[in-house]
Amino acid sequence: MSVALFTFHGYGTWMPDHERGYVKRDSGVLPPDPEMAENYRRKQNRDAVTFADEHGRVISDAIQTACDKEGWRLHYCITVETHVHPLVSWKDESTPIDRVYNRLKQAAGFALAQHFRTNGQPYFSRGGGEDRKPVVDEEHFEHLMTRYLPDHHGYTFNERSTNQSRGL
């Protein structure tokens, strides 16, 4: 079984001048770069996107629906002001992590566009390589479920706090 924590950043919310640096596809985590941030801002064609609870509900429902259709399991999903973290597992280990990432991100973006009637609005950044983190073992999974994700504050789905069965 494969398990991964994904991150979808709101469009324009994590710029290269962020104090913790930034992620660039195929380059990994890079140190803060104010000049690059200014280049990114000049290329932005829309305002930065932030998420409220209503966005979180739409995102969480869309990710759950996509998981149900694909036979995947959504363990946890938290939407904070600037990003979304779904924690997902899937049985078929031949399914590439990028396919899961892209399917969930696409489902969430489509649902937001439908709900808020904003066709063409980019809701998420085109993420870098750090947006897909495989879960290495049960201890890592438990850390994510009980410490890392609960430390975020926003709209939350946690399979352990519902009465629904989503067995894989």
Image (cartoon, rainbow, N blue to C red):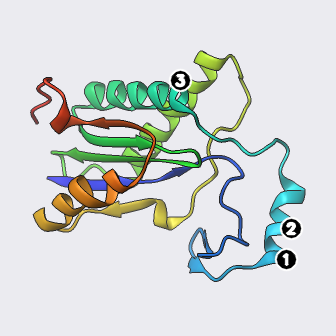
What is the number of the mark on residue 111?
3
Side (left or right) of 6 relative to 127? left
Compared to residue 15, the image places residue 125 above or below, namely above
Which secondary structure, mark 2?
helix
Which secondary structure, mark 1?
helix
Report the number of numbered marks.
3
Q: For the residue marked with disc 2, what is the amino acid?
A: Glu
**Residue 70 x %, y %:** 28, 31
Identify the residue shown where x is 21% and y is 32%: 71
**Residue 37 x %, y %:** 79, 68
Identify the residue shown where x is 41% and y is 59%: 132
User: How far separated are the C-alphas under marks 2 and 1?
Assistant: 5 Å
User: How far separated are the C-alphas under marks 1 and 3?
Assistant: 34 Å
What residue did someone put label 1 on?
35
Identify the residue shown where x is 71% and y is 70%: 16
Q: For the residue marked with disc 1, what is the amino acid?
A: Glu
